[in-house]
Amino acid sequence: MLEFSILAVFVPTFFFVSATPGMCMTLSMTMGMTIGLRRTLWMMAGELIGVGLVAFLSVIGVAAIMLNYPEAFAIFKYVGGAYLIFLGVQMWQSRGKMAVTSENSVSSALSRKTLALQGFVTAVANPKGWAFFISLLPPFINSQAPLAPQLAALIMIILIVEFICLLAYASGGRTLRRFLQKSGNISLMNRIAGSLMIGVGIWLATG
């Protein structure tokens, strides 16, 4: 198990990094604004699986190989980014699967599988995420102790902290949604969400 002194440093460090606005957090806020908090949980599930996988592979060394061959990220980055941009453009035009209309409160056009897959791709296709875990995790691993329990504990902490931050961002999007709906600014809400989605797509494809 991890020592308390390690946890006292690791938990606030990762919380600060996770809470900082990034691709996944912006995506969570955007989806919370458009499809609602409950359905955004499916995107979060895929994102958390991706983050856990990246953290695990970073420790065992696979990430170092992947970072030396950036073409391994190409399919994830470009396809995932292009899809987000496509959704963003449709939202900006107040149409498509995620656009909010005055007739329906929460869109159900996107399947749970699609939402989870988008969260997974966004997490796995982020080279900065790989680089971050490569630099962050090794210093907290005691080479003289068994690796498996240490890695399991660190990944569990990572996933809990990441989920809390995703939930906070999605809740913020839901609050903004309610405010704009009360003001009757459905079109403005779609444009804000669409612009954020386009930004995340460009960030993912070019990051």
Image: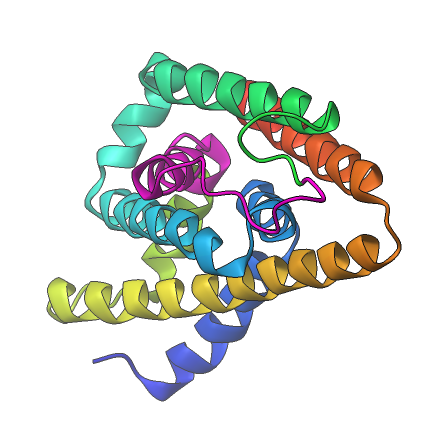
From the viewer's side, name the closer residue of 108 and 84. Answer: 108
Quarter of the view holding residue 198: top right
Name the image quarter holding the C terminus: top right
Residue 102: x %, y % from top left = 72, 44
Name the image quarter holding the N terminus: bottom left
Residue 39: x %, y % from top left = 45, 53
Quarter of the view holding residue 4: bottom left
From the viewer's side, name the closer residue of 140 and 47. Answer: 47
204 versus 161 height, above or below: above
Which range of residues does the magenta coloring cover? 101-130
Q: Is residue 111 magenta?
A: yes
Q: Residue at (24%, 50%) from the top-left corner?
A: 56
Residue 144: x %, y % from top left = 15, 69
Residue 207 seen in the current view: no
Extreme residue in the right direction: 183
**Colouring mode (rainbow / by chain / secondary structure / one colour):** rainbow
Q: Residue at (70%, 31%) from the top-left corner?
A: 194
109 versus 67 height, above or below: below
Quarter of the view holding residue 172: bottom right
160 versus 48 height, above or below: below
Residue 112 seen in the current view: yes
Residue 177: x %, y % from top left = 72, 55
Q: Residue at (66%, 59%) from the top-left corner?
A: 174
